[in-house]
């Protein structure tokens, strides 16, 4: 499990493909309600969703999409601020790429290094990975990093409305790619403390209601909506 501490994003501007409902815009105190109910139960549903109650109902959180949001915003902070420390690999691994892949990767190497990867460009189409972000699961001898590089070529950022936002398209692309592959997956069991930490970290982000791809991270059901189900 790799759950970050709550982030200080006061001075960070983030542009992303975002669709937020009117109810969500008008409900900034949802996180406060979760935080003030420290003694209440949260539980995991099918090792994929976290159920927690708020003052006027319940919330169902997608643990994977929530973790993507947390990791995305942490990556953006790392791009501009202090880079993350990496975990050295006992046996560095050499990865060979195709021509289009290595060209895309070389542009992104400085950003990957700031989230904790140690990458040495050996020239040609090969790189050596000698460090990975602390807590990164599913490394599988470089397959995870290769999947991230594949995303650099396939993920589209055309929906990103930058306007006067400070984030650049390549930063957004690398952050989305890293968050997607480093986040918790469905099927990962969490302890009560881990669920609480994930929820707290989610509501410390700038946009807790959506993943970096614009998908909803949670579903809110009011007591009135629940009661209507039993009429």
Image: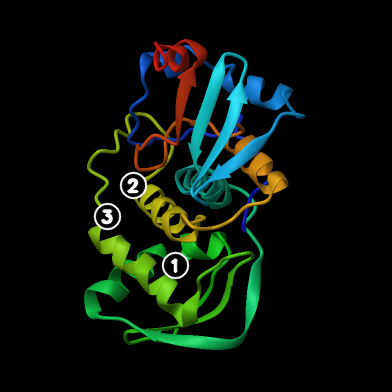
Q: How is the image coloured?
A: rainbow
Residue occupied by mark 3: 155
Residues 86 and 54: in front is 54
Q: In terms of sequence position, does the residue under pointer 1 or pointer 2 come before the other?
A: 1
Counting from the top left corner in percent of width and height, residue 206 is at 53, 31
* Disc 2: which residue: 169
**Whole-percent x and y of residue 108?**
40, 63
Distance of label 2 from label 3 (alpha carbons): 11 Å
Disc 1 secondary structure class: helix
Residue located beneath label 1 in the image: 109
* Residue 224 x/y as whole percent: 47, 10
> Where is 113 relative to 185, above or below?
below
Q: Characterize the local packing of mark 2: few (<14), some (14-19) or many (20 or more) Cα atoms within 10 angstroms.
A: some
Indicate the quadrant where residue 158 lies. top left
Please name the residue shown 62% across and 57% down the image: 2
Closest to the observer, 69 or 228: 228
């Amino acid at each position: 499990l790799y759950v970050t501490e709550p982030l200080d994003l006061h001075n960070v501007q983030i542009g992303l493909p975002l669709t937020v409902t009117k109810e969500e815009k008008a409900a900034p105190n949802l996180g406060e309600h979760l935080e003030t109910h420290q003694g209440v139960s949260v539980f995991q549903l099918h090792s994929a969703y976290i159920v927690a109650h708020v003052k006027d109902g319940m919330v169902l959180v997608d643990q994977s999409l929530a973790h993507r949001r947390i990791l995305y915003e942490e990556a953006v902070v790392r791009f501009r601020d202090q880079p993350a420390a990496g975990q050295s690999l006992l046996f560095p691994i050499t990865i060979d790429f195709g021509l289009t892949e290595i060209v895309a990767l070389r542009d992104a190497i400085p950003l990957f290094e700031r989230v904790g990867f140690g990458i040495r460009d050996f020239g040609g189409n090969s790189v050596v990975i000698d460090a990975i972000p602390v807590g990164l699961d599913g490394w599988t001898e470089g397959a995870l990093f290769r999947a991230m590089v594949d995303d650099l070529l396939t993920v589209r950022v055309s929906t990103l409305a930058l306007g006067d936002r400070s984030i650049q398209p390549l930063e957004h692309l690398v952050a989305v790619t890293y968050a997607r592959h480093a986040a918790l997956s469905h099927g990962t069991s969490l302890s009560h403390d881990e669920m609480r930490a994930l929820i707290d970290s989610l509501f410390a982000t700038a946009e807790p209601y959506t993943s970096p791809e614009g998908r909803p991270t949670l579903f809110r059901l009011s007591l009135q909506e629940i009661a209507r189900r039993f009429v």
